[in-house]
Image (spheres, grey):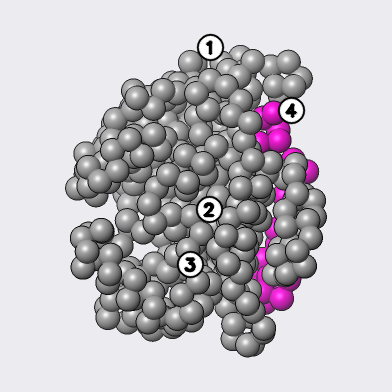
């Protein structure tokens, strides 16, 4: 933890790193295919892509990482290049890519955990919890200088997490049926994994370091990445990492969501630096909003925790845009979302008469068209 503190004390404010997870799919049937290792090995001929991809629990999933950008614009440009290379590489191998928080019908019992030391430990420690977690998300790392400051920024972001989740909700279907949720991914991952979801408010580095030390001393964890909170200080990078959001079906939505996450971290840091009044809401109250975001997404209501009143969840975007306006102006960040998010659009397709396979095929086609398309032809008719 002394080394971790040093990483934060040497960090640079508002550098950005982006991470996006994709499902590997059969190009016509659109089911999950366990071909991560094949795609990884093929990427060895492309040094940029090879350095940007990573395995993520199951062999039918792949993650791309922008690396450190000095600002959001440079990280976004690097991630766009990663996506273009990934989609082209997948197409060359006869694969399609999916970008929703869950696969609508894949059987988790047929998926394989990738063979790395880290994920062998995850599987051994969690068993069913790990096996069931066939989910896909998008994360943003934002550099924050100062260890105490990074923890206090995380504290300020706790109540923001449900709003980001409602905005990003993109996983209504699971196990071949409508789950009734807007983010089934959150229920599978965040509500099942230990040390996950909304963290406690620590109030500074000392309490945070003491907790991590407790986990290590009691052999609860062997590496920090086994702390899976939805917002966390990341000691290896000197960043605050936001990890609450579902994967996004289109490039523009993914970039808008990443920009909003970065803006929220920057604004929380600005508010802290300005000593703006702030009271940490109890976790139990924040969790009420998390559940509302999981269940109803932008179609429901969220709770204004300061006033104890509800408001339409559809206002979450505007509320965050208003709050982050100073940071966005300073950093030159523009954010624009479509009228409906991914979960809403998927349900709208089903209500219009599409089958589940047709709706997912349309989403996969949308991803292929908005993330740069490869040569694999994917039809909305599914299988």
Location of mark 4 (residue): 348
Sequence-wise, which precedes: disc 1 or disc 2?
Answer: 2
Mark with earlier residue (4, 1): 4
Q: Label 1 near label 4: C-beta < 8 Å?
A: no
Determine crowd level at label 3: few under 14, some 14-19, many 20+ residues with C-alpha closer than 10 A.
Answer: some
> Which quadrant of the rendered structure holds the N terminus?
bottom left
Residue carrying label 1 = 383
Q: Nearer the viewer, residue 373 or 22?
A: 22
Q: CA distance from mark 4 to mark 1?
A: 20 Å
Secondary structure found at label 3: loop
Q: Earlier in the sequence, mark 2 or mark 3?
A: 3
The disc placed on residue 200 is 3
Q: Is residue 117 visible?
A: yes
Q: Earlier in the sequence, mark 4 or mark 2?
A: 2
Element marked by disc 4: helix
x and y percentages locating residue 343 in the rendered image: 66, 36
Mark nearer the viewer, 4 or 1: 4
Q: Which residues are magenta?
A: 325-348
Q: Position of residue 95 (x, y in %)?
A: 42, 26
- In the foreground, 191 or 94: 191
- Name the residue rendered at 80%, 51% in the picture: 312
Asked which quadrant contains residue 315, the reply is: bottom right
Q: Gap between marks 4 and 3, in whole Å?
A: 37 Å
* Number of marks in the rendered image: 4
Mark 1 vs mark 2, CA separation in Å: 32 Å
**Which one is nearer the viewer's eye here, 199 or 117?**
199
């Amino acid at each position: 933890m002394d080394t971790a503190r040093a990483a934060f004390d040497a960090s640079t404010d508002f550098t950005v790193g982006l991470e996006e997870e994709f499902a590997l799919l059969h190009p016509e049937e659109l089911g999950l295919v366990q071909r991560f290792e094949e795609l990884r090995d093929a990427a060895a001929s492309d040094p940029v892509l090879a350095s940007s991809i990573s395995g993520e629990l199951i062999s039918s999933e792949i993650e791309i990482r922008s690396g450190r950008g000095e600002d959001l614009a440079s990280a976004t440009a690097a991630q766009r290049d990663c996506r273009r290379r990934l989609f082209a590489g997948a197409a060359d191998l006869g694969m399609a890519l999916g970008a929703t928080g869950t696969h609508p019908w894949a059987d988790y019992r047929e998926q394989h955990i990738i063979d790395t030391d880290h994920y062998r430990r995850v599987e051994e420690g969690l068993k069913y919890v790990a096996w069931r977690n066939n989910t896909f998300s998008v994360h943003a790392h934002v550099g924050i200088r100062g260890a105490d400051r990074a923890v206090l920024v995380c504290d300020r972001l706790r109540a923001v997490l449900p709003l980001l989740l409602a905005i990003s909700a993109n996983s209504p279907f699971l196990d071949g049926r409508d789950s009734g949720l807007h983010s089934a991914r959150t229920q599978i991952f965040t509500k099942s994994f230990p040390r996950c979801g909304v963290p406690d408010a620590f109030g500074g580095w000392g309490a945070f370091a003491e907790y991590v030390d407790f986990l290590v001393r009691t052999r609860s964890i062997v590496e920090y990445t086994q702390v899976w909170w939805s917002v966390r200080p990341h000691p290896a990078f000197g960043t605050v990492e936001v990890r609450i959001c579902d994967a996004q079906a289109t490039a523009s939505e993914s970039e808008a969501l990443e920009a909003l996450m970065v803006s929220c971290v920057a604004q929380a840091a600005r508010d802290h630096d300005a000593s703006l009044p702030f009271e940490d809401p109890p976790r139990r109250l924040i969790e009420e909003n998390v559940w509302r975001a999981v269940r109803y997404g932008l179609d429901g209501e969220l709770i204004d925790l300061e006033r104890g009143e509800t408001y339409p969840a559809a206002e979450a975007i505007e509320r965050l845009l208003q709050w982050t306006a100073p940071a966005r102006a300073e950093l030159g960040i523009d954010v624009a979302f479509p009228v409906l998010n991914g979960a809403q659009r998927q349900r709208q397709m089903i209500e219009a008469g599409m089958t589940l396979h047709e709706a997912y095929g349309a989403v996969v086609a949308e991803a292929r068209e908005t993330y740069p398309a490869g040569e694999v032809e994917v039809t909305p008719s599914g299988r």
